[in-house]
Amino acid sequence: MIQAIGLTSNARQELPPAVDDVSFEARTGRVTALLGAEAAGKTTALRLMLELQQGRGVTYFRGRPLHRIAQPSREVGVLLGEVPGHPARSVRNHLRMLCAAVAVPITRADDVLEAVGLVSLRDQHLGTLSSGMDRRLGLACALLADPHALVLDGPAEGLSARESAWLHEILRAHADQGGTVLFTTDDPKEAARTADRVVTLDEGRLIADQEATDFARTRLRPRVAVLTPHAARLGALLTKEARAARKPVEVVREEGNRLSVYGSNCAEVGETAYRHGILVHQLADELGDAGPSAPPGPPTQPKLSAEPALAVALTASGECRPAGVHGPAQARVGLPAPPAQTRDEPQPQPQPPTTRAKEDAQAQSATTGHAPLAQLEGSPPAQADIDTPSRNGDTPQQPLDTATTAQAEPEAAAAAQTEPDAAAPALTEEGEAEPSRAETAAIRLVPLRDADRAPLPQDDSTAPRTGGPHPPAPPPPTPASALPPPITVRPGRTPLWPLRYELRRLAGVGTGYLTLAAVLAASAVISLVVARVGHTPQPRLLAAWPNALPLPPAALGAGLLGALAFGDEFRYPALAADRGTVPRRLSLLAAKLLVAAATALLLGALAVGADAALLHLVYGEELVGVPGDWLVLCASWVALLTGCAWAGVLAAGVFRSTTAGLAAVLAVPILVVPVVQKAVDGPAVRSAAGFPGRLRDLALVQWPFGSERILAAGVRMLAQPVGTALMLSLTTLLCVYLLTTVRGRVR
């Protein structure tokens, strides 16, 4: 169950908040629709619930706020807009990458693909999917961790009628399996047809929280609003005139002196009131869901008893029987018996004004002050099989005349065809037939087995995690506080398997392979040109690094791949699909640094090998001989490539951009090296000449396997301007990254 309490967004300068003190519930096993026009605050309410936007309020998911849940993706599946995935990644690779993020087996991707009907498109790129297929993929991402609740923002927006029907069948199947579904929509008919409960927002405030049957009856159909001090008498007159004319009119007595007349218009109601001398204070048409908004304050809960309006349908012979609005998968509500009426009831005659008070009292007692007066034949389909006992414990209500009711069924069906119920499913606007029950019966959401779940980290919540249908009640709000608690945006805790996630992220798109091919081609061309010109040492020749270039192609390629490691996350935030921000976790940073270093070393080895093979093929063996200090040169080459890759990773993580990461790599030889050279060449700096020899003299034992040579090579590289500049850049970027991470946790 989802409980939203006091959701309020921050003020927008002089404008009112987008969401102002909204509270509602989405119960387990039911589908709840959050209805509202554009800019009514639906998306803002969801973002406040998911702690993606700052504000005030609290939302409990089965008794716990989202930040107290160890892994939120296993509690709530989220779909906000389009799938934020890399357009060049395939559908299957995208889901496999998210499997590592939520710590579920890789086979779970194939299960959800089959559940949402994307098996045939598993190799398609995300950028080539239609809007309907994109919504199916988003639903697959939300179902990947087998969550208890689904929170979807406009899931059927832009879909065809058939795709929308399929989507709502999936949501219904999830609710029937014991889950909770909350989705937003701006279509009242969609909400009444597919949801069990409808929560209506208007200008950021909650104006209605109703069952779908009550919503379809009171707020969906066009009606005439009448305000008169003689509401009971006018209602009785409208009922009798409609029965005499056999018009499909339903009169509902609202609270106070208000009537809602369905199936009529202002002219007919006004003429009836004028003929009988009834004073009318208000007479207005209300179309669709544009009824009067409730005043600010807590919403009025719907009453499922004898107090609300009761619909009564006339049979062909004039008898009355209970009627109601029903839709798919909606619970039927027991209705009390209407007042008995005889077949030979006399028609009303005009009465003098002196007897109107007496008639008003009689009509009030006959209708108990609240019951509606009539709903004639031809109105929305009636419920003749109501079998729920009333709130007083009486026996189930039956039609007053079963014979006449059975006789009126064909006529009522014909009238329903001419005037279908707005809340009942019908043909689509495009002329397509919605899928039948037999067609959607094959939908099965495959649950995630407990054995396949990775162990969750310890939750700091004291409430136990229960998977049953009766969750623990949430803790009551603190009475001492006049305002709801503030909502703080917190980064997500994904991925749970960072190394697997990073490997699948790198191998899932062709950017790495294209970068590898471009680096090898550029390195081969540069080495051939430099070898033909001459005057270049052999190590630089093998690395394709002439003096005119700030860095060799392999180092630039390593920096680019490192920058893409974080840059793609901010541009296509796969990790931010459920929490909105890319997490700054040290485990994720360590995985990216490890994978970036391994990729850089592979790239450097292939580049040197390709250059040596090409030089041997073109110029012979004199340019590819093994130098005497090959171990020192290899160590320097490894350090340079690893440093460039790490600089790209850290800079992209700090500045949230791939371009910034690559710029940080290029800034090392162009900007930092001249500064280091100027500092080293200064008169106040002492020379470190002879340091490797003095370091070897200080060793108590001889270093095994010639390790002192590697150490000396490292010291010599650090003494070079490029090595010093690279080390300073890495140290600075790492400190800034850690500072931003710690600052975010403190906030």
Image (spheres, grey):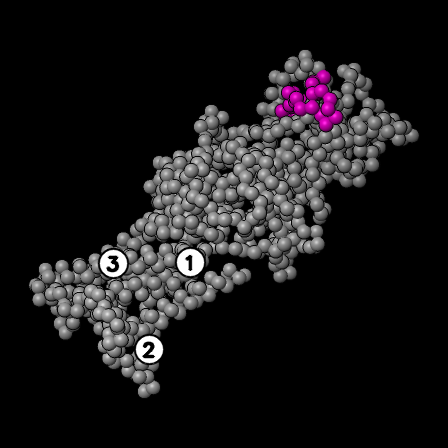
Q: x and y percent of residue 12 in the render?
A: 61, 59
Residue 676, labelled with which disc?
A: 2
- Circle 1 or circle 2, nearest the eye: 1
Residue that mark 1 sits on = 586
Q: SS of the residue at dot 2?
A: helix
Nearer to me, 643 or 198: 643
Asked whether 119 falls inside the magenta stretch, the response is no
Q: Is residue 303 left or right of residue 277?
A: left
Q: In percent of the image, x 71 and y 48: which residue is there?
A: 296
- Please tell me whether residue 507 is drawn above or below residue 413 in the rendered image: below
Do the residues under discs 1 and 2 have CB atoms within 8 angstroms?
Answer: no
Q: In percent of the image, x 25 and y 64: which residue is there?
A: 638
Residue that mark 3 sits on = 603
- Circle 3 or circle 1, nearest the eye: 1
- Please tell me whether residue 655 is drawn above or below residue 202 in the rendered image: below
Where are the magenta residues, as a range?
Answer: 375-400
The answer to whether residue 585 of the structure is visible from this angle is yes
